[in-house]
Amino acid sequence: MKRTILQRLMLLCAIVSLTSCIKDEEANKECDILKAWVDGDEYKEYFTDENQMRREVSTGESEIVFTVRSLISLPKQLPLTLTITDNATVEPASGSMQDFTQGPVIYTVTSEDGQWKRQYKVLFQEADLPTYTYGFENVAVSEKTASSSYYHEFYELDAQGQRRNIWASGNPGAALTISYSQPDAFPTYSIEDGYEGKGLCLQTISAGSLGAMMKKPIAAGNLFLGKFIVENVLFNTLKTTQFGIPIDKEPVRVTGYYKYRPGEKFTDKDMTVIEGKTDEANIYAVFYRNKDEQGNEVYLYGDDVLSSPYIVKKAQVASLPATDEWTRFEMFFEGEDADDEKVENREYNMTLVFSSSKDGAAFEGAIGSRLYVDEVEVSFEK
């Protein structure tokens, strides 16, 4: 049936209108990896457990780490499947076979509009650490933040000389309020004159006007085995600290060296001075089950690191008197005996925690408190 001139004009207008809508729709500018996993039952044997085959990637992460039993036996080609933001592209392609035995593989995600790119370092590491003596000699400088500040990051080296980011601190959170500053203005930084070689300094600082407004007026220096989740800083502070790394030994004792000098005025979260109260440093360790009854992964956070029902043993230094001399400390793990089979299967995590203000998680302490730590050694059951 022939269309009238009016019908043809109406059809043309509809096509033009539809085309215009398509052109006006703004292309996605995001370029993130959201999830990463190794797909295939044939690869399960290379991992400590099935949960280690999958990784959720948080907003602030640019490094994705998988823990395997051995790099030597790991296949030279593994397929890594990725979930990325809508309509973005990634190179190498999701699901493509890659060799992770020679070091990190760099994945580049490009936004739909082609204007933005983001790189992720994906690496596979052996579960074993070469030593359980921590001298804090391995230090890197972070990339500059939006406020042109940069801070220190502590790490260890595995048997292949690869960097292992097992240490975390609150420095990324402090960077939200610190502008144009170098590492020694942050809560956690490296010093050159440790007990042996370099050492660790933790200091309690002001969190500035933003922190005061949020009733979080101070930032205590801290370092711990685990992960810091920066996106929880403002509204879910106790979930910023994810404590623990897998371990295949049962810890008995922790020793090391420290110096400590508390700040002058102890204040509460309203910055009210508490007369007669002196700030205290804190050093403790926790050994806990990293799986629940259904086999799901378990982590401890700031709200349950000392109270979770999954804790098997804890160790804490009874007191850290003020001293300007390097002084030895020692603490013993107390609690239940671990299950040997579960220990061998790495079904336990351990964290070590150092803080310049014992009540820093509640935003109480003294600005200016400084705790120095070095040459920390963990002893295990034979």
Image (cartoon, rainbow, N blue to C red):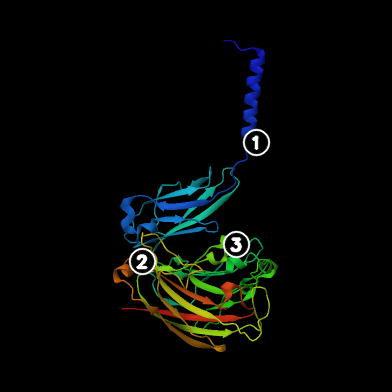
Q: Position of residue 297 (x, y in %)?
A: 41, 61
Q: What element does badge 3 sit on?
A: loop
For mark 1, what is the residue?
24
Instruction: Compare marks 2 and 3 and give the one earlier in the sequence.
Output: 3
Q: Earlier in the sequence, mark 1 or mark 2?
A: 1
Amino acid type, residue under disc 2 in the picture: Glu
Regarding mark 1 in the picture, which secondary structure is present there? Answer: helix
How far, Cα to Cα, is label 2 from label 3?
Answer: 31 Å
The answer to which of 170 and 130 lies nearer the viewer is 170
- Residue sitting at x 64%, y 21%: 12
Which mark's residue is nearer the viewer, 1 or 3?
A: 3
> Which quadrant is home to the N terminus?
top right
What's the amino acid at mark 1?
A: Asp
> Residue tagged by mark 2?
347
Q: Residue 235 shows which numbered tag? A: 3
Residue 321: where, in percent of width, then height?
Answer: 54, 88
